[in-house]
Amino acid sequence: MLKKILILTILFQNFVLSQNNFDNFLNDVVQESIHDSEIMLEGYMSPFGSAIGFGLNGGWYNTAKPHNLGGFDITAGLHIISIPSNAQSYNPENDFENFGIDGNQNIPTFFGDKNTNSQINVFDSDGETIIYKFNAPGGIDLSYVPIPYFQGSIGGPKKTDILFRLSPFKLDFGKMEIGYWGIGFKHDLLQWIPIADKIPIDLSYLISYSKLSSSFNFDGNRSLDFKVRGLNQYLALSKKLSFITLYSGVGYHFSNSRLELLGNYNAQDEVNQNLIDPLDFSFGNINGFKADLGIRMKILIFNIHANYTRAEYDIFTVGLSLTTEGLY
């Protein structure tokens, strides 16, 4: 319990407090309001984990047809993840026990407005006396999150592609860095149907696993890190018309987020101790159905594709591929 108090205090110190106010905040606020501190932390950061989870599981295919054995493609692409308006603010008032909100009841999330008109009042255990006040943290004011990626695939036996993906570099949003990788498999289903040669489409099953690592640096030695993992399954359908391929799919995906606080942290008074890497906090699983619609155009040894994914966080993906398709 004592460690949890310190952890939550450190998080709010870095988001909303100056160093001079840290001791008062520790002694007067968090010990009265562990539950409310957790509510604010989860409400503020959950949309970030959600957005990344949707991004990890998006854009894994641009055709349902696997490569021939040994065939391959290399793709450079970009996801644009749309942040819905209901993920840019949250209202925790009804969940608070010792906190109260003055001003705007809708507090910005990580993606919300930079400026906030919300003041958090912290009451003592009897709920009558205000013992501390602080401004709710603002967000980074983003409605769209871009995530570039490299993806490759190579044709294996039994009309099965091996897919792999990685971010070409860590994106830098001020104090935040993001990078990720993934692996997947795409398997042709029509080969198991006796009349497959009479079906004028391609149909495959795809499964992928991804992991994202992100870091928000408070200073040179301390950071708040996310690890987000995603699992993705699809039934993908495509139809080639000359140099144009139309494709779509329906799928089910899952992701979870983990928050870690890294570095050395000191507390005063009765908590007088030094903690190293004190936080490992899981929250917010995401799971649900989604649907894709896309188009791919072949120009010599290149493919250009674009697709739209309909989900809670919509995704628009574009990419350029170098491919061996049609060469043998």
Image: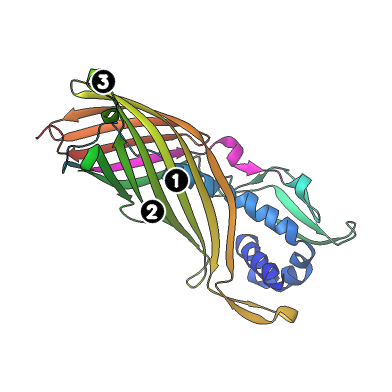
**Residue 251 vertical position relative to residue 147 in the rendered view, above or below:** above
Q: Is residue 86 magenta?
A: yes
Q: How far apart are marks 1 and 3 (CA)?
A: 32 Å
Q: In which quarter of the image is residue 137?
A: bottom right
Q: Which of 168 and 56 is in front in this view?
A: 56
* Left or right: 270 as drawn, with respect to 234: right
Write down the residue under mark 1: 231
Main secondary-structure element of the magenta-colored stretch: strand
Q: How many marks are shown on the rendered structure?
A: 3
Residue type beneath disc 1 = Leu
Percent position of residue 202, x then y: 28, 26
Write down the residue under mark 2: 180
Q: Nearer the viewer, mark 1 or mark 3?
A: 3
x 65%, y 62%: residue: 12
Numbered range of the magenta stretch: 74-91
Mark 3: secondary structure: loop
Write down the residue under mark 3: 195
Which quadrant of the rendered structure holds the N terminus? Answer: bottom right
Q: Distance between the residues labelled 2 and 1?
A: 14 Å
Q: Say which label, 1 or 3, has the lower sequence index.
A: 3
Percent position of residue 155, x then y: 21, 42
Percent position of residue 147, x then y: 39, 46
Percent position of residue 46, x then y: 58, 49
Residue type beneath disc 2 = Tyr
Q: Say which label, 2 or 1, has the lower sequence index.
A: 2
Mark 1: secondary structure: strand
x 73%, y 52%: residue: 119
Other residues around mark 2 within 10 Å, as few (<14) / some (14–19) / many (≥20) = many
Residue type beneath disc 3 = Ile
